[in-house]
Image (tube, grey):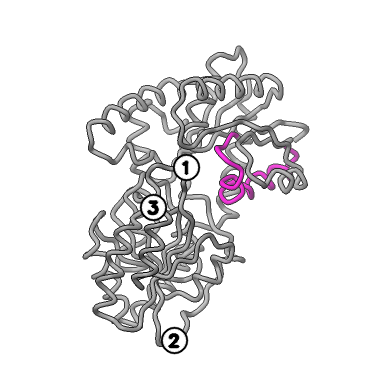
Amino acid sequence: MGNNKLLFIVNVDWFFISHRLPIALKALEEGYEVHLACAFSNKKEELKRLGIQCHDIAFSRSGYSLREELSVIVNIRKLIKKINPDIVHAVTIKPVLYSGFVLQSIMHPPALVAAISGLGYVFTANTIRAKLTRLIVFLLYKFALRGKRKKVIFQNSSDQKILSDIVNLTEIDRTLIKGSGADLSIYQYKLEPQTKIKVISMACRLLKEKGVLQFVDAARIITTRFPDVEFWLIGNVDPENPNSITAEEVDSWVEEGVIIALGHRDDIPKLFAESHIITMPSFYGEGVPKVLIEAAACGRPIVTTDNPGCRESVIDKKTGLIVPIKDSVAIADAISILLMNNQMRIDMGARARDYAVNEFDVNNVVEKHIEIYKSLMVNKQ
């Protein structure tokens, strides 16, 4: 393979580690020189020890300063000119758009792998502001993805159809890979605990669009129906995101006794093994939520929404139940069905594990990415 250079451009280091690190490690094994450009929290030294060359790019997750965003674009261009990568692998909206803009200005640009991890809330909201923003983003994608040597990776068929129609992507230009995968050796199948108290868990960034408010409302309904249930809310508030749940709201729910707030946890496999049902009633523009893939891998039935990405994580009525978005009563009813039917719940969990093995094994996801890289190198001009 020689010293072919692969540059990942991602918003922040922790997201790279949770969603793309296995691909980077395999690329290193294949002989690629791997670079990562992102905003770093506290993971840089860990990544450098793994052999990944790290470069700071100050992506803002909440700011809308035109000056700051233009500075990011300029810095991406400088970095690409300096490294001269063979492939740029950009993940999520800003990295994809900004990398696409930059490559238009380079005489002999590298190939672009654009990972669309969900089109975002703006593509599902119906407010006037959202519709206007959607039109602008459509135009930006159309410009950013007009290069010749590219592969656009979608996580669900809805996103693929929407963006392919807008950008006129051919079948050669695009591919569908359902999510980032789960390590099946870590997220192992275990029978649900034989305990009197049944646990319903939700793990995510605590954003309103993830369905946190609906989860809490459903918990209120179910605790009036079933005395022996616990609702675990796993994850942190996100102060940089204007749509985050606040710490005060979480504290009030805990004081009310409707949920148990566990905060950020690094032992998700253990927590899922201690749970009976996993839910995430999202109405966000998801790719395929990694946490639902992990829940399936652990053999837990899922209750989620009829939302792009979420519905790809479940075979309705076989590995879980799909409900309408923003419908707390429907969530409560679906969870109630699973609480009342022990064998249904166990059977759905077993089928969920089989589905994860067939669809979401991280090793398969990694191999598909390496094949994409190799195909782009073969077509190098």
Lower position in the chain sequence, tag 3 or tag 2: 2
Residue 10 found in image quarter: top right
Residue beneath the point at 28% across and 54% down: 306
**Majority secondary structure of the magenta segment?**
helix
| Viewer-nearest residue: 91 or 181 | 91
The amino acid beneath tag 2 is: Thr
Q: Say if residue 150 shows up in the picture.
A: yes
Secondary element at tag 1: loop
Q: What segment carries the magenta color?
A: 9-32
Secondary element at tag 2: loop
| Image mark for residue 245 | 3
**Residue 207 appears at what percent x and percent y?**
39, 50
**Residue 172 appears at what percent x and percent y?**
47, 32
**Residue 127 appears at what percent x and percent y?**
23, 36
The amino acid beneath tag 1 is: Glu
| Viewer-nearest residue: 130 or 310 | 130
Label 1 close to label 3 by CB (< 8 Å): no
Lower position in the chain sequence, tag 1 or tag 3: 1
Count residues near mark 3 (Cα–Cα under 10 Å), then give few for <14, some for 14-19, many for 20+: many
Alpha-carbon span between mark 1 and mark 2? 39 Å
Residue 11, magenta (yes or no)? yes
Which mark lies nearer to you, 3 or 2?
Answer: 3
Residue beneath the point at 42% across and 46% down: 287
**Residue 43 appears at what percent x and percent y?**
67, 47
| Image mark for residue 195 | 2
| Image mark for residue 240 | 1
